[in-house]
Structure formats: C-alpha cells, structure tokens
Image: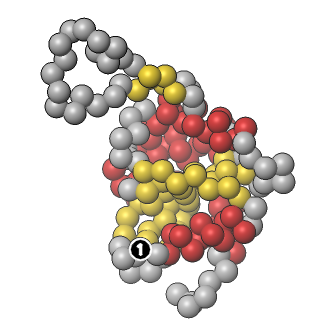
Amino acid sequence: MALITTGNGLIRDLEKFGALGVYVPLEGGYEGRYQRRLRAAGYTTLHITAKGLGDVAAYLTRIHGVRPPHLGKKSTGSGAAVGQVYYLPPILDSHLEQLPPKSKGLVLWIIEGHILSNQELEYLTNLPQLEPRVRVIIERGGDRSFRWTSLEKTLLAS
C-alpha cells in the first residue's frame, strides 16, 4: 500500500456498489484515514459497532425500544426503573435530517462486522437501494493491508 493514499478508489467503489466490506490491519489507524478522505469528498460518516445492535433494520430505520441494563441490582417491585423501556428514534433518519445541504450522503461505517449474520449483511447490502443517500462500509475482518470489496462478494464468501 502506498505511504500516502488519496482514497479515490474506495470512494469510487463505494459510489459504484453502495456497500463495501473492508479488511483492515489489526493494529488499526487506516480506517481513520479513509474516514477523513470520505469527509473531504463530501460525505458525513457515522461510526458504530455491530455488537449490541440487536435487530439491525429496526435500529437503523424504525422507532425501537431499549431497556436499560440491570447492572446486577435486584428490583424491589416499586420504582420507575422496573420494566421501563426507552423508545429511541431511528438512527439513520435522525442523521439524514441533519445532513448539510451540499453533502453527498451518509456513510454508515460499522466495526466488528464479522459477528453479523448473513441475513443482516444482506439487509445492509440492500440498504443503499432503499435509501439512496446512505452508503455502508462494514469491517469484515483483519488483513495485512487495508483492502475492500463489494459487500455482496463478502456475503457470498461467508
């Protein structure tokens, strides 16, 4: 890999395929450089982890309920926290509403994507067709150099 990279290939493939699977060196650092390149190209990035997402479609595009963790405490049966559910707005809609007027769109960068099921990966592959302003990059695993391919190809390989 070149010492200084422009990221044009990644941006070109992201616009072509809509969803990419990336393999990053385990020591890290490269993903931040490419996120900076995406922001310079006019995209807004949203960096989230795949762990704890639950239902990916509901988390990204629908109002969904979240229960606070119990933290090992016993409930006494009285109080506001017993059985309480907080309802959160869809994360993609709230970020798309706040996009600058000249933005090319929102890039959803998901780390630890190796834990996602094939059904969740298939949904994320089709997400750019459902919402044209959204692009998806999922970290699928580690490698010696930073490389990417279409998310559909990584789905077929798994």
Q: Residue furthest top?
A: 78
* Position of residue 128 measured from the top left corner of the image (x, y, whole percent): 65, 45
Residue 140 shows up from this direction: yes
- Taking the spot 65% from the left edge, 61% from the top edge, the residue there is 14
Taking the image as shown, residue 93 lies to the left or right of residue 158, namely right
- Taking the spot 65% from the left edge, 36% from the top edge, the residue there is 94
Which is more toward the observer, 39 or 12? 39
> Is 11 drawn above or below residue 123 in the view shown?
below
Q: Amino acid at mark 1?
A: Gly
* Position of residue 80 measured from the top left corner of the image (x, y, whole percent): 34, 14
Which is more toward the observer, 129 or 24? 24
- Taking the spot 57% from the left edge, 90% from the top edge, the residue there is 2
Q: Which residue is mark 1?
A: 28
Taking the image as shown, residue 52 lies to the left or right of residue 100, namely left
Residue 17 occupies quadrant: bottom right
SS label for mark 1: loop
- Colour mapping: secondary structure
Location of the C terminus by quadrant is bottom left
Taking the image as shown, residue 140 lies to the left or right of residue 58, namely left
* Position of residue 72 measured from the top left corner of the image (x, y, whole percent): 16, 31
> Is 99 drawn above or below residue 32 in the view shown?
above
